[in-house]
Image: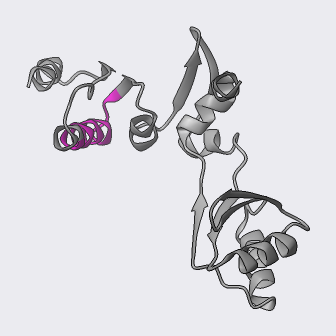
Amino acid sequence: MRRRLDIAMSLIGNPAIIFLDEPTTGLDPEARKTMWQAIRTLAKNGTTIFLTTQYLDEADELADTIAVLHEGKIVATGTGNELKKLVPSGLIHLTFQDQKQLAAAVAILGNGYQVTETNGLTITVAGAASAAQIAELFIRLRDNKLEPTDFSQQVPTLDDVFFKLTGKANKEKK
């Protein structure tokens, strides 16, 4: 309620610019969604909003332009989609019925894709970023009478962008 009151008070007089510092910190999901809608409405009505947030999904959802800060310096700017292009994409997770099918899929896809076994009957295939590459992957499987029992595509998030730009993920793995 205090955050809502703070924002309501800042709107008195229809300001052209509003600075919001971590406006959804501590809010439950319903209140966060309501706050996002209020921010969208302000922007739609012509208010320029400078939003600071550590929730990168929030920046992706609300911002037209995003600046990624690291150690007090801007390390990248752009739209969410522009920033996500900085991270390699094209990870496909495929699950197979048994070890025989899994091994056959690894052999077939190993030529042209980077294939790693992730766990159990699932592999991760890198290098299928475009629709044509994904189609080619499934055509290879079909032509060899292999059908995954499940599959998913992993697309980059702004968290992935942050880790790539700051090197945090590499440091944590060491």
What residue is at 12 percent from the left and 24 percent from the top? 8
- Which residue is at 62% across, 38% downward? 83
Task: Give the x, y percent position of residue 52.
Answer: 40, 21
Image x and y of residue 161, in percent: 62, 35
The quarter in which the N terminus is drawn is top left
In the rendered image, residue 75 lying in the magenta stretch gets the answer no
- Residue 135 image-quadrant placement: bottom right
**Eyeballing the image, is 147 above or below 10?**
below
Seen in the image, is 64 located left or right of residue 73? left
Q: Position of residue 24 (x, y in %)?
A: 26, 29
Task: Relative to 20, say whether 144 is above or below.
Answer: below
Q: x and y percent of residue 13 in the render?
A: 14, 20
Closer to the camera, 136 or 15? 136
Magenta segment, prevailing SS (helix, strand or loop) = helix
**Residue placed at 62% from the left, 63% from the top?**
120
133 or 112: nearer the viewer: 112
- 39 w.r.t. 147: above or below: above
Q: Quadrant of the C terminus?
A: top right
Q: Quadrant of residue 163?
A: top right
Q: Nearer the viewer, residue 85 or 8?
A: 85
Left/right of residue 130 with respect to residue 34 in the rendered view: right
Residue at the limit of the structure toward the top, as seen here: 72
Magenta stretch, residue numbers: 33-48
Q: Is residue 42 highlighted in magenta?
A: yes
What scheme was used to colour the molecule? one colour
Q: Is residue 26 above or below residue 45?
A: above
Q: How many marks?
A: 0
Q: Nearer the viewer, residue 22 or 146?
A: 146
Question: Is 72 placed left or right of 170 in the picture?
Answer: left
